[in-house]
Image (cartoon, rainbow, N blue to C red):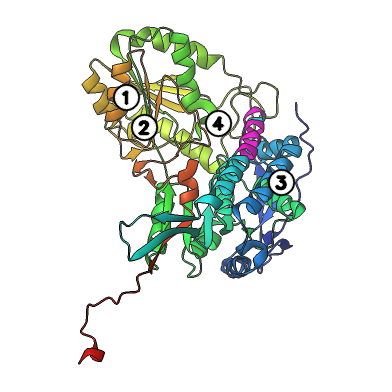
Amino acid sequence: MANRNVPIPRRQLYIGGEWREPVKKNRIPIINPATEEIIGDIPAATAEDVDIAVEAARKAIGRDDWGSTTGAQRAKYLRAIAAKVLEKKSVLATLESLDSGKTLYESAADMDDVAGCFEYYAGLAEALDSRRKTPVNLNSDSYKSYVLREPLGVVGLITPWNYPLLMAIWKVAPALAAGCAAILKPSELASITCLELGEICREIGLPSGALNILTGLGPEAGGPLASHPHVDKISFTGSGPTGSKIMTAAAQLVKPVSLELGGKSPIVVFDDIDNLDIAAEWTLFGIFANTGQVCSATSRLIVQENIASAFMDRLLKWTKNIKISDPLEEDCKLGPVVSAGQYEKVLKFISNAKSEGATILCGGERPQHLKKGYYVQPTIITDVNTSMEIWKEEVFGPVLCVKTFKTEEEAIELANDTKYGLGAAVMSKDVKRCERFTKAFQTGIIWINCSQPTFNQLPWGGKKRSGFGRDLGEWGLENFLNIKQVTEYTSAEPLAFYKSPSKN
């Protein structure tokens, strides 16, 4: 088991390159979801702190040491941060697991991905130098023109608790690569590693105010950030209701937003798959990885009727083989959900499904061997109809619901029977069929013969109530750039639109 005695650093808010106590001096307890014990606390920012952070960010943009940097100069900072994350990987991964309940294996993988994301955007920052000023051919001898790509300005980044540092970095890395000054507001349920990012930025000498980190409650810190008149954009990942509030606040100032919200993603399994075990493992990974707390989790299994019995048999065997334990234990593959509130919410979804007539095929309650912690067994629910809550609403926990189908048309109809549109998966060896489903799925992300693989180079985001805008890839960088066109009149001839007074 990893060292659970890693001390929890007692940090303040990270503003203007230094640690600052919140104006109101409030703090929020940190609860370890595996033990239900208080293991530390974080500072609670309020509107007053948001004002100070916005001012620090504005100053950073106006200073040469950040506001006038080239992409190549910013890339050096991003690579230095990546190196520090890898140097501190063991401690950061342990802190992430203690804070969020994420298995140590997954936390360690997250830290590798964090470093990889910084490295990726370092490369894009360097490439931006040659793209910053792009000539445009107007097919005119009288004008020459070019397009400038410039930093958007001060950006607010509001991020979730399910991948506390990684999801933050999906926004922080491109924002810094673009040359913006950022204010990061992580979820109050898991903020430790985001505060440690502040210490890393201090250690590597990131110019003051380029990144500011405000922990605290959504209404007290996230709300004032979203509605602040001197914040030029908000990028948010989280729940649909909170996304709507942020969009409403930003709309008052016609402030641009990008939103990555919830999902109820389907995985469609056809009878032509060669190997039931491979398909079963991908199905499990799509819903039980990170204890099901994944916005893109493929939480609706749609399996072809004539293999349903055999496939469900394999699925049950794989599910019962998952190690559920303290997340710091070796080979733990399912830890607790993040909080007491989340625990109660997941169990309520399961009990509602049962009362609506669905069958709890396995799981559905606390594991018997774990008396403490917010643990929920991996749960599979069958006999589901499309009017049930469990089919329609995002659970954000280790809960899979199952329906069968006969025809492709029925499968597509079931897959798209959701208000969300983030991800979708299809399992079939028929290439043409997979192409048809790729076209038919109403989502931003599609997986063929897999579920959930994520790469820095590819866009991440959805449609419908899963939000709009994209993180990652070159699209993640474009989020934080302002496009400015510049046109110059180069002819010596007059415009000759008006009659010249000199010729009267």
The Cα–Cα distance between marks 1 and 4, rounded to whole angstroms, is 24 Å
The reply to whether the C-beta atoms of the residues labelled 3 and 4 are less than 8 Å apart is no
Reading the image, the residue beneath label 4 is: 290
Q: Earlier in the sequence, mark 2 or mark 1?
A: 1
| Left or right of residue 314: residue 331 | right
The Cα–Cα distance between marks 4 and 2, rounded to whole angstroms, is 19 Å
From where the camera sits, is residue 264 visible?
Answer: yes
Q: Earlier in the sequence, mark 3 or mark 1?
A: 3
Q: Does the magenta portion include 415?
A: no
Q: Earlier in the sequence, mark 1 or mark 4?
A: 4
Magenta residues span 105-116
Q: How far across and down, in percent of the image, does residue 80 sit? A: 71, 46
Reading the image, the residue beneath label 3 is: 80
Q: How far across and down, in percent of the image, does residue 172 sit? A: 58, 50
Q: Residue at x 70, y 48 (%)?
A: 196
Element type at mark 2: helix
Identify the image quadrant of residue 138. Answer: bottom left
Element type at mark 1: loop
Reading the image, the residue beneath label 1 is: 384
Element type at mark 4: helix
Q: Earlier in the sequence, mark 3 or mark 4?
A: 3
Q: Residue at x 53, y 27 (%)?
A: 289
| Left or right of residue 306: residue 395 | right
Look at the image and tell me in which quarter the N terminus lies.
top right
Q: Does the magenta portion include 107?
A: yes
> Is residue 220 or residue 486 the one in the foreground?
486
Reading the image, the residue beneath label 2 is: 390
Element type at mark 3: helix
> Is residue 17 or residue 62 the one in the foreground?
62
